[in-house]
Amino acid sequence: MKRLIKYIILPFPFLVSCVRYNANCNITIKEFLKENRNKVFGTKVDDGKVLEFRDKGRDSLVGGYYSFDSNGYLKSYQFFSNMKEYVYNEEYDKKGSLINVMGYPLVHNVARLTSDSSVNISMYFFTLKKSYKRINVITSDNRNFNLTPVKDTLYSNMLVSSFEFNNLKREQDIIAYFDVEYENECSKKIESFKDTITLHYTPLK
């Protein structure tokens, strides 16, 4: 029996990088609920209208949080890694136009054992007004994956892609380098980012 003792997502600039936008991208409550009604629940009511929503997720602690203004336009989105901290943020002006982005739309990673010697890594990509063109992963054991994401069943406006490390027999770091390209459908701009996932694997004694 083997165990994965920890995983670290690097680097941490996910929390601080900001981009300025000036692109019309109106998103209404009606449009949002049409695709995601079964994945979210309302958290704030103002003048008889539900204006804030949170992903149900597995426990509602990890997931997306949406805030709409009184006109029904999306005001902000954050993906929370726990109850108090978020790793990704989008902000919109009063007309519903995207004006600020903090972080990258790879918002969540999950590593789990699939056997005594295999680790599966799932990567979650926020997909609201985004079209993913390339998700490439190169692993520390010299494998190259071109991943095709699929619609996630747990989180709203989310795609998920997975890959595995196999035949793990000793304590070691396992590393995945990824290169992502997507089209921002609001600005029609092609955007890209690169990053690294590092996991430390150790056998049970």
Image (tube, rainbow, N blue to C red):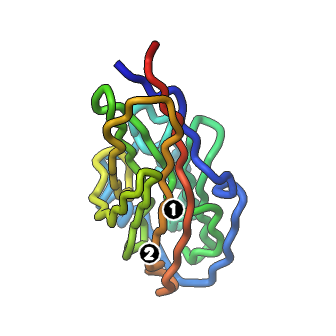
x, y percent for residue 93 = 63, 73
Q: Which mark is residue 182?
A: 2
In the rendered image, the residue lying farthest to the right is 16
Against 161, is 101 above or below?
below
- Which element type, helix, strand or loop, lies under badge 1? loop
Q: Quadrant of residue 121?
A: top left
Residue at image location 53% in from the left, 83% down from the top? 24
CB under 8 Å between discs 1 and 2: yes
Question: As displayed, is residue 3 above or below residue 64?
Answer: above
For image coordinates 65% across by 70% down, the residue present is 100
Front residue of this view, candidates 67 and 183 = 183
Q: Secondary structure at mark 2?
A: strand
Decide if residue 49 is in sight here. Answer: no
Image quarter hosting the N terminus: top left
Q: Going by the image, does 30 lie left or right of 14?
A: left
Could you say where residue 48 lies in the image, as x and y percent from the top left? 48, 49
Question: Can residue 22 be seen in the rendering of this structure?
Answer: yes
